[in-house]
Amino acid sequence: MAYVITEPCVDVKDKSCVNVCPVDCIYTDDEDRMLYINPDECIDCGACEPECPVAAIFAEEEVPDKWKNFTPINTLYFNDKSAARAQVDKMYPEKREVE
């Protein structure tokens, strides 16, 4: 099991979760629209979850049904960043305005 970052992070990319991760398993590049947790590096400590200001992080088995598609996207990102970005762009073709 690992933690998964979901839809509320798209176009937000608040990095509060990165600062508390003891194993540095949360990644993003400038061209990414969200953050990603490496499932092979995540130690399931849960430190990131309460730090997320938009409640985008869930334990894998607790991801809400409406965002289950983000679990494979998080995994895909570490094998093919372009494909993961394309999936996010397909779901959200326009940059979302966030408050």
Image (cartoon, rainbow, N blue to C red):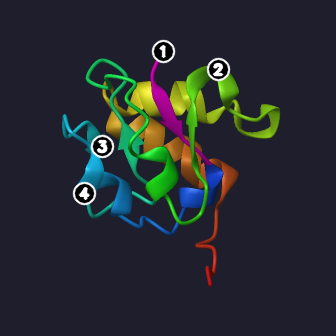
Q: Residue at x 27, y 64 (%)?
A: 30
Q: Which amino acid is tagged 3?
A: Ile
Q: Position of residue 2 (x, y in %)?
A: 45, 22
Residue picked out by circle 1: 1
Closer to us: mark 4 or mark 3? 4
Residue highlighted by disc 3: 26
| Amino acid type of the residue tagged 1 in the rendering | Met
Q: CA distance from mark 2 to mark 1?
A: 8 Å
- Residue span colored magenta: 1-6
| Residue for point 61% across, 55% down | 55
Q: Secondary structure at mark 1?
A: loop
Among numbered discs 2 and 1, the one appearing first in the sequence: 1
Measured Cα–Cα span from mark 4 to mark 2: 24 Å
| Circles 1 and 3: CB atoms closer than 8 Å | no
Quarter of the C terminus within the rendering: bottom right
In the rendered image, residue 59, in percent from the top left (x then y), is placed at: 56, 29
Real-space Cα separation, disc 3 to disc 2, in angstroms: 18 Å
Q: Is residue 67 at all visible to an observer of this figure?
A: yes
What secondary structure is marked by label 4?
A: helix
What is the crowding at mark 4: few (fewer than 14 residues within 10 Å), some, or many (at least 20)?
A: few
Measured as percent of width and height from the top left, residue 98 is found at 61, 79
**Circle 2: residue type:** Glu
Mark 4: amino acid: Asn
Instruction: Compare residues 95 and 11 and report the one nearer the observer.
Output: 11
Residue annotated with mark 2: 61
Give the SS element for disc 3.
Answer: strand
Q: Are marks 2 and 1 in contact (CB under 8 Å)?
A: yes
Q: Which is more foreground, mark 3 or mark 2?
A: 2
Q: Which residue is mark 4?
A: 19
* Circle nearer the N terminus (4, 3): 4
Question: Who comes first in sequence, dot 4 or dot 1?
Answer: 1
Q: Is residue 64 above or below residue 10?
A: above
